Image (cartoon, rainbow, N blue to C red):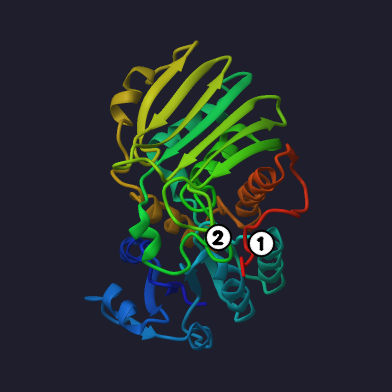
Amino acid sequence: MSQELRFALIGCGRVAPKHIASLKEIKGARLVAICDKDLAKAKEKGKGLEGVDYIQDHRELLKRDDIDVVSVLTESGTHAEITIEAAKAGKHVVVEKPMALTLRDADRMIRQCDRNGVKLFVVKQNRFNLPVVKLREALEAGRFGKMVMGTVRVRWCRKQDYYDQDPWRGTWALDGGVFTNQASHHIDLLEWMMGDVESVFAKSTTRLVDTETEDTGVAVLKFTNGALGVIEATTATRPKDLEGSISILGSGGTVEIGGFAVNEMKVWNFSEEKSGDAEVLERYHTNPPDVYGFGHLEYLRSVVDCIQGNGQALVNGLEGRRSLELINAIYESAETGKEVRLNFVPRYSRLGRSEG
C-alpha cells in the first residue's frame, strides 16, 4: 500500500459531496475514482476534480489495484453485499449509516473484513461535533455520577417529494424508516453516552407520507446500568425541521445539546463547577452549522490515521452493529407490541425484508 491512501466512492447520493469535500482536505488521502450506476450522476458529483476516474460498475472498480479504501454510499440495503465484495478484493471499507439493515448482514460484513485483513469503518460523524465531544469528555471524567436518564429527539421534515425521489426510499428492503435512517446517528449517540441497553419497548406509525415504513415512532429504553432512556423520532414535523437533540441527566449534572443536528450546546449544568464551565455555552454553542457539518472531515481523518497505524477506529464494525441491534429491537417491539430484551435474534422486524 502506498503511503498516500487512495479512495474510491461507490454511490452518489446526498452525502457524496461531503465525502468528496472532506477527502480534498485530508493529508495522506486522495480520491481516485467515483462510481455510480448512473454515470452522469458520478460525473456531476465529481465536476471540477482532477485525476478522478468515473466508473459505472462497482465490480470493475474493485478489480483495480490502485485503490486502497472504498466508501460505500449506496442505499442501506445494498451496503452488505458491496462491503463483502470490497473486503474480498482486499480494500478497506468506509460504510455510511446504517452499516446494514439486518444483524445477519452486519455479522457477515464484520467476518469478511476480518478474514481478509481489512478494516471496516461505520460513519457516525456526529460523534465529532464539538458540543458532543465536550459532552463525552464530561462523561469520561465521571461528572454525571449515577446515570438517571438519556433522551434523544429527532423532529425533522421529510415530505412526500423526498420519498418520491428514488423508489428505494421508505422501503423495508433497502431503506427503513425514521428510526433506521434519520435517527440512526442519534440512537448511536444515546448508546455511546448511556451504555448498553437491556430492553426496549416501542411504538411506531406512518402519519403523513405514503411509504412502507414508519415516519413517526417512540421507544422507551432500560439501560444495563439501571438508567432509563427515551427516543422520539419523526419526519412528520411540519412545515420544516425543528430539532435533533440529546439530553443526558445524572446525579452530578445535566447536559442538553440541541439545534437541528445535535450541534448547539443548550444546557451545561454540574453540581461541582470546574474551570472553563462558564465558557462552555459560548464556546460550543453552534458547531457544525448543518446536518452533515464538518464531522465527515474529522471522521475520515480518523480513518486515515487508523489505517496508517496512528490510532484506533472510533466506530468499527462491532460498534456499528451495536446501534443496529437496538434499531432492530425497536422494530421487533413495534411489531409484537412487547418489550424486547437485547442480545436477541430478530423474528418479526421487517427491516431488510421485501414487502413483496
Disc 1 marks a residue whose amino acid type is: Ala
Residue 30 in the image: above or below residue 240: below
Disc 2 marks a residue whose amino acid type is: Phe
Give the left or right position of residue 348, taking residue 159 as reference.
right
Instruction: Specify the farthest residue to the left.
Output: 48
**Between residues 204 and 21, which one lies in front from this camera angle?**
204
- The tag earlier along the polypeptide, 2 or 1, is 1
**Residue 69 percent across, percent down from the top left:** 50, 72
Residue 51 in the image: above or below residue 23: below
Does residue 310 show up?
yes
**Between residues 172 and 148, which one lies in front from this camera angle?**
172
C-alpha gap between disc 2 and disc 1 = 12 Å
Of the numbered discs in the image, which one, if any, rests on residue 182? none
Q: Are marks 2 and 1 in contact (CB under 8 Å)?
A: no
Give the residue displayed 35% in from the left and 24% down from the top. 280
**Residue 26 percent across, percent down from the top left:** 36, 62
Give the residue displayed 64% in from the left and 79% down from the top. 88
Residue 277 in the image: above or below residue 340: above
Give the residue displayed 36% in from the left and 46% down from the top. 157
The local secondary structure at tag 1 comes to: helix
The residue at which mark 2 appears reads as 121
Give the residue displayed 29% in from the left and 73% down from the top. 45
The local secondary structure at tag 2 comes to: strand
Mark 2 or 1, closer to the camera = 1
**Residue 289 percent across, percent down from the top left:** 28, 43
Quarter of the image for the C terminus: give it: bottom right
**Residue 173 percent across, percent down from the top left:** 58, 65
The residue at which mark 1 appears reads as 106
- Give the crowd class for mark 1: few <14, some 14-19, many >=20 residues within 10 Å: many
